[in-house]
Image (tube, grey):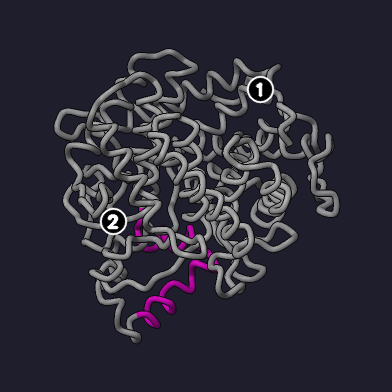
């Protein structure tokens, strides 16, 4: 499947956006549509296998160094050895003999981008439908069989807190996200193999991963089948899959119990000011991790809870708690992480480190979901300026991360320097999903 049959919009020059007028006008809308199509063509040119921001961590000497990273001297050695990342990240990986690989979450981002494009680009809806079919078929071909069920790993050796993980070991993050894509594809493409893959994903997560019980019916799910970690955004990924399967009449008592337990845990882990840390309080204490909230994981948790609410699969009392939790979290998110011009910062306490392109993209997705949600009151949406902020975020992401000459998307920025890895999961795919999402809302006059 290539883009040869698709005619790109005529946009010989990339025009800068006017952020003084935040609400999207027709000119801005056309610019974003142009960007989306050009990024998709660039992905076709480069293929799905790419280098990744974290792939160096699974190779020596970094594998050893990260195992001893608690020592201050080791941290400085890591920083020194990673300086080539700022100058020539792809060449550096070639010298380290790190092969490119396909990150399964790329399927999630691209698949959702094509699904949204079917809505906002009606003249070419059939083309985007074919693209969605193609990316789902690629995902199925790249799946694992674990205990006889379909699921997904990370596509490459992966260094975690628990040592080196094999590409053949399923991962909760990728399995939940690609499983959700399979279910979404089934709803528009009507393929039994997609529904079967989504069900398999949920069963692997429920039966083969480690679930910890907490007080008051709370549950956590591990990142890997053989670990005891308790990552909050991973729980939110799994909650979306379970909720949407139940909404699709795939009833299973295990899904019902686990969904409610995960949601109760996420509610309990919210801090008094509305933030979530990366891991649960128990896990951070056990592993000696510092408590911190970051931009893109916060956005993921918020829109996950919104999507669980939209599924209608929570008991009324629990749903009411989730509504209050989401509104509180959204207010914290908008007030702590964003500048008035759409700039996003990685951490709320020090507005020094700019968020990655994923931070921008997940924020845009989060705010788009919030703008369209019936669970966010109009007064709150207006006071937080959600619609204008969502537009500004996408525009800033395109301005600051897209190379308008080659149409590559950088993964990070360090000052004025972009780190251009050409990643999909940490680059073009995430940005395409955000761009397509906001164009979808614009076409339906939500924005």
Residue 301: % across, % down: 46, 49
Residue 374: % across, % down: 60, 35
Q: Residues within 10 Å of mark 1 (few under 14, many from 20)?
A: few
| Residue 39 picture quarter | top right
CA separation, marks 2 and 1?
44 Å
> Do the residues bearing badges 2 and 1 touch, measured as CB atoms within 8 Å?
no
User: Mark 2 = which residue?
Assistant: 230
Residue segment shown in magenta: 75-98
Determine whether, in the image, residue 246 is placed left or right of residue 404.
Answer: left
Q: Residue at x 53, y 52 (%)?
A: 358
Whether residue 405 is visible to the viewer of this picture, yes or no, is no
Q: Nearer the viewer, residue 308 or 66?
A: 308
| Residue 419 picture quarter | bottom right
Q: Nearer the viewer, residue 89 or 386?
A: 386
Q: Nearer the viewer, residue 435 or 339?
A: 339
Q: Secondary structure at mark 2?
A: loop
Whether residue 121 is visible to the viewer of this picture, yes or no, is yes
Q: Residues within 10 Å of mark 2 (few under 14, many from 20)?
A: many
Q: Secondary structure at mark 1?
A: loop
Determine whether, in the image, residue 215 is placed left or right of residue 173.
Answer: left
Q: Is residue 145 above or below residue 228?
A: above
Residue 348: % across, % down: 56, 68
Q: Give the number of the disc on residue 6.
A: 1
Q: Residue at x 25, y 50 (%)?
A: 222
């Amino acid at each position: 499947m290539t883009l040869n049959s698709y005619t790109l919009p005529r946009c010989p020059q990339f025009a800068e956006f006017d952020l003084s007028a935040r609400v999207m006008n027709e000119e801005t809308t056309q610019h974003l549509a142009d960007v989306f199509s050009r990024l998709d063509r660039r992905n076709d040119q480069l293929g799905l296998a790419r280098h990744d921001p974290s792939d160096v961590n699974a190779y020596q000497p970094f594998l050893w160094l990260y195992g001893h990273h608690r020592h201050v001297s080791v941290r400085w050695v890591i920083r020194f050895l990673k300086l080539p990342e700022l100058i020539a990240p792809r060449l550096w990986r070639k010298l380290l003999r790190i092969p490119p690989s396909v990150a399964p979450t790329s399927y999630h981002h691209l698949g959702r981008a094509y699904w949204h494009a079917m809505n906002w680009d009606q003249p070419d809806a059939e083309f985007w439908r074919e693209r969605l079919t193609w990316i789902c078929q690629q995902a199925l071909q790249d799946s694992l069989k674990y205990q006889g069920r379909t699921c997904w790993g990370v596509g490459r050796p992966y260094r975690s807190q628990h040592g080196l993980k094999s590409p053949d070991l399923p991962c909760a993050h990728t399995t939940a996200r690609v499983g959700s894509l399979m279910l979404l594809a089934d709803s528009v493409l009507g393929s039994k193999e997609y529904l079967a893959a989504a069900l398999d994903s949920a069963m692997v997560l429920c039966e083969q991963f480690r679930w910890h019980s907490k007080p008051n019916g709370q549950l956590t799910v591990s990142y890997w089948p053989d670990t005891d970690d308790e990552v909050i955004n991973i729980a939110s990924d799994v909650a979306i899959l379970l909720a949407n399967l139940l909404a699709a009449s795939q009833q299973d008592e295990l899904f019902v119990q686990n969904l409610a337990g995960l949601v109760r845990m996420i509610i309990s882990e919210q801090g008094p000011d509305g933030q979530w840390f990366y891991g649960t309080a128990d896990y951070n204490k056990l592993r000696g991790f510092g408590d911190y909230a970051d931009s893109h994981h916060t956005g993921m948790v918020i829109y996950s809870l919104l999507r669980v609410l939209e599924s209608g699969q929570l008991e009324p009392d629990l749903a009411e708690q989730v509504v209050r939790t989401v509104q509180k979290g959204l207010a914290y998110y908008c007030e702590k992480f964003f500048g008035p011009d759409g700039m996003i910062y990685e951490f709320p306490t020090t507005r020094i480190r700019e968020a990655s392109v994923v931070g921008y993209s997940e924020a845009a997705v989060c705010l788009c979901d919030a703008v369209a949600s019936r669970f966010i009151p109009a007064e709150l949406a207006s006071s937080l300026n959600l619609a204008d902020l969502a537009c500004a975020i996408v525009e800033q992401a395109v301005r600051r991360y897209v190379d308008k000459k080659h149409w590559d998307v950088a993964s990070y920025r360090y000052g004025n320097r972009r780190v251009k890895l050409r990643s999909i999961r940490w680059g073009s795919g995430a940005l395409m999903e955000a761009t397509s999402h906001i164009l979808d809302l614009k076409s339906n006059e939500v924005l």
